[in-house]
Structures are given as structure tokens and as C-alpha cells.
Amino acid sequence: MKTNPYEYEFSTIDATVPVHVSTPQNLDNFTLFDFSAKWDIVPTMLCQNHKQLIKGFYGQTTSFNKQYIKKDVLIMGENKSLNIARYIHGTMGKGTWTFYSGHDPEDYQHKVGDPPTDLNLHPNSAGYRLILNNILFPAAKKKKQKT
């Protein structure tokens, strides 16, 4: 754990440096996995989107080094060529958690103090859609299945 507030990386799982610093913006994308709604209800809801290729963007944790992700964590979005995950999901106790790396899907290097992004300018943002999926996800109820 790094405690210097002027250093953006929190720990070794963060792949901001050197991965993203050396990757051109046009190649800094990630792909969502395609899940079966019949067998994988939760990841299907969390990955529901109109695009499968999502533009990358920076944040406190820009992406996750896959070598540090535990085996029971579900990777829902990754960049295979950079060996990083951008969207992960798992369980803890009786609950679940989901991490979507980065900060602002429509501002590649949004920095502290930058003006807020006008969401009205991005009504069809695939990146914001993933955020919305996570907000709406807790409201989804499983239907009791006939046995």
C-alpha cells in the first residue's frame, strides 16, 4: 500500500504505470465478455451494453494487473494484449462487489480540479452505461424459478 497522496498508484494491482503511460490512447481499449443470460444472470446485467469494445480512460486505479486478481474473481472486461482487467466482479460474505477501473469514461485523463463532464453531451456513452448498470443492478430481483 502506498501512502503518498501525490502518487496515484495505491498498490501493485494498479496498472497505470507503466502499462497505460506507454500505451497510445487509441489502443487503450477493453473488451466486455459476453455472458449467457440463462446461466450468468448477474454478469449479463452488469455487462449489458450497446458496444462490446469500450474506450479506456485513466483514474486512481486505471486498470488491474491480472497477476494480482484472485482466482475466484470474475473478469468481465479486459485488454488481453496489455494483460489487464478493467471490470471485475466477485462475492464477499452474503454480498457482491464490482470494480470498474478509471474515473471518467468520456474524459481520457480527467484530473483533480478539472471541470465536471457534461453528461448531456454523452447520452450514448458505453462507459457511462456500465456505471448505470451498477447503479440499477441492486434493484433487480431474481424470479423464483419453477422446479
Image (spheres, rainbow, N blue to C red):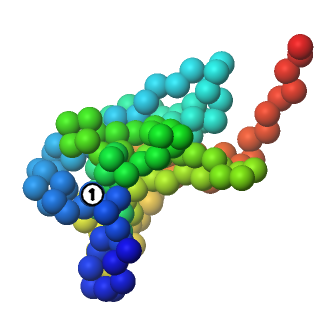
User: What residue appears at the point 89 percent right and 16 percent down from the top-left corner?
Assistant: 146
Using the image as rendered, state which of residue 38 and residue 121 is in the foreground. 38
Residue 106 in sight in this render: no
Residue 27 in sight in this render: yes
User: What residue appears at the point 45 percent right and 58 percent down from the top-left corner?
Assistant: 120
> Where residue 62 appears, x then y in whole percent?
32, 59
**How many numbered marks does the figure carry?**
1
The amino acid type of the residue labelled 1 equals Ala
User: What residue appears at the point 35 percent right and 59 percent down from the top-left corner?
Assistant: 13
Q: Quadrant of the C terminus?
A: top right
97 sits left or right of 141 in the view: left
> Where residue 122 appears, x then y in whole percent?
40, 52
> Where residue 65 appears, x then y in whole percent?
31, 51
112 sits left or right of 69 in the view: left
User: What residue appears at the point 60 percent right and 52 percent down from the top-left corner?
Assistant: 97
In the rendered view, would you say 48 is above or below 1? above
